[in-house]
Image (cartoon, rainbow, N blue to C red):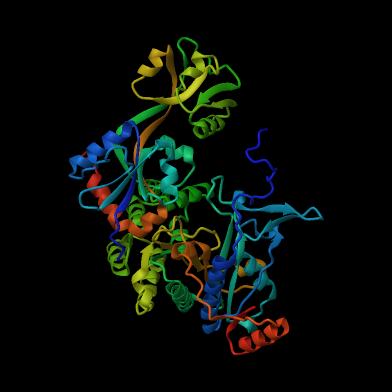
Amino acid sequence: MSSEKALTIALPKGRLQKKIQELFAKKGVNINFEDRKLVAYDDDMKYKFILVKNADLPTYVNYGIAGIGVCGTDVIYESGFDFYKPLTFSFGGTTMCLAGTKGENNWKEERPLRVSSKFTEFTRDYYNQLGIPVEIVKLNGSVELGPVLGLTPYIVDLVETGSTLKANNLEVFEKLKDIKVKMICNPAYYKVHYERINELVEFLKEEA
Amino acid sequence: MEFIVEQDTRLLRNPQGTEGLLLEEAYCHLKTVNRIEDIFLSWGYLPSKTPAFDYYDVYKDYLSQNKELFRLFDRDGDLMVLRSDITLFLAKQLGMSLCDADLPVRIFYGDTILRHQGKTDISKNEFFQIGAELVGVPGMRGDAEVLALMTEVLDNIGVDYYCHIGSRAFYDLAVEGLDEEQKESAAFWIRSREYTKVVELLGSVMDAARADAIGQLFACIGDSAHFASLLESLKGKLSSAQAKALEYLVELMELTSKLDAAARFRLDLSEIGQRSYYTGISFSVYADGADSAVASGGRYDRLLEQYGFSSPSTGFSILLRKLEQLKGCEPIKQDAVEVNDEDPAEALKKAAEIRKKGRIAIL
């Protein structure tokens, strides 16, 4: 009975976009964003894909602009919004870490802990729960510059291969949390379209 | 600080989350409210008005989400709360004034509530809640009446919607053995549809087979037939009270199966009620295109007794502006006559005569 309008799915620009398109392609669904366009349909018009900035993806899904999205648990947490997360993907996982200048690992003693990060909500909540006073400087990118330029001695950031840290003479001091890539759904959108969304989840499930 | 405009117009803006409604949009809203009120009246419901604010302490047990409330101190230093939930405010008024001889009471309302929705730009803090309450009719008959009334209103508004019905009663039975903190976690996981976590939590206080059965039931969404068949296969693993609470839902669906709106009902046990005062069925309505539930309700048999009068009660409320935004506003079609007369006194007289005949006269 739910209308056969295309399901709207938000995809993140950046490192995850290609992996997601590959997964869909493997399952026979081609996503083709023409020439700087940010909206694309699959060949059967079953899905409408929109390409958005990673950090904004939860916002679009929260307001129902896209009913479904694919993004990391890092941006989900920062957004503060509630979603259904019916599927976890095997690709794209990273680790949220505390890092700083190589050889200067004094975070257990230095108080307050002075940290630069894009992930202010996560950082604040994480250290509050441990009872560690923390001073956070919000940066929007190239967070490694924090310790390099003397803004703060420590950073909280995503680490994948660690090559960015290494190149800037930084190292991981603590692994804080595993970050996974998940499918998110606006809860109200899910309730209206649950049959087709459940089908999509089954469709995308990767073989174990 | 540099100003972008020359004049200092800082006060000429609305505080975040408030809205004004003017002219055509307000007319549209008014007409919709009138139509809905006529429906309520045709079912024998009478209107009500609740105070815009009240003592916070009276409601604090049910208003656990403090950050969504607008609170203020009155001149005596008492902490007040601005009306954030009409069901609650109305319950107190009814609790204080009803007696057995009055029952059953059919009452409706339509008014603004204030709830702080959060830090973002386009969320609203002011909502118009319209709904109804049936006091003194217990069990299935009361539940069916309220569902039928609500769906008649929604059908009249004319949006594509689904009503997801769950059972707070079943949820309370399912989490009985858990402590308060675990219950909160269970509620969170159930609402988030994270069933492995629900089963894990329940498994700490019951055998694995029962925990798994309950987990499967919380995960199920579907029409009555679909739900009934799942229940049939699992009920041996439930306690008899738990099975009964679920059979109630299936029976309720049978009772309402002849309604036009029956195809829009789904059984969905993750609907455990946003407020803690629910005791029986709890339901939410979702519309295609709305980013969150547009209506909700349920049975709350022990709410009125908190305020001085014990009586079973069931009801629903609709966030009307959300539905109006989906429907949009039709241009006003008024049967209006423009009165042109050189003599203003004549014009006034002519206009009055036109109005007496039931048409609109604009000078």
| Vertical placement of residue B236 versus A203, above or below | below
| Vertical placement of residue B37 versus A103, above or below | below
Asked whether, in this view, residue B31 is left or right of residue B285, the answer is: right
| Residue B147 percent coordinates (x, y) | 45, 73
| Residue B278 percent coordinates (x, y) | 52, 64
Q: Quadrant of the C terminus of chain B?
A: bottom right
**In terms of depth relative to the viewer, which is nearer, B46 or B305?**
B46
| Vertical placement of residue B168 versus B361, above or below | above
Q: Is residue B142 visible?
A: yes
| Residue B285 percent coordinates (x, y) | 44, 64
**In terms of depth relative to the viewer, which is nearer, B86 or B17?**
B17
| Residue B215 percent coordinates (x, y) | 36, 54
**In terms of depth relative to the viewer, which is nearer, A68 or B91?**
A68
Asked whether, in this view, residue B345 is left or right of residue A131, the answer is: right
Q: Residue furthest top?
A: A103
Residue drawn at the location 47% of the way across and 45% of the way down:
A81
Q: Quadrant of the N terminus of chain B?
A: top right
Residue drawn at the location 29% of the way across and 63% of the way down:
B230
| Vertical placement of residue A73 versus A46, above or below | above
Q: Is residue B313 visible?
A: no
Q: Residue furthest right?
A: B76
Q: How many marks?
A: 0
**In terms of depth relative to the viewer, which is nearer, B308 or B112?**
B112
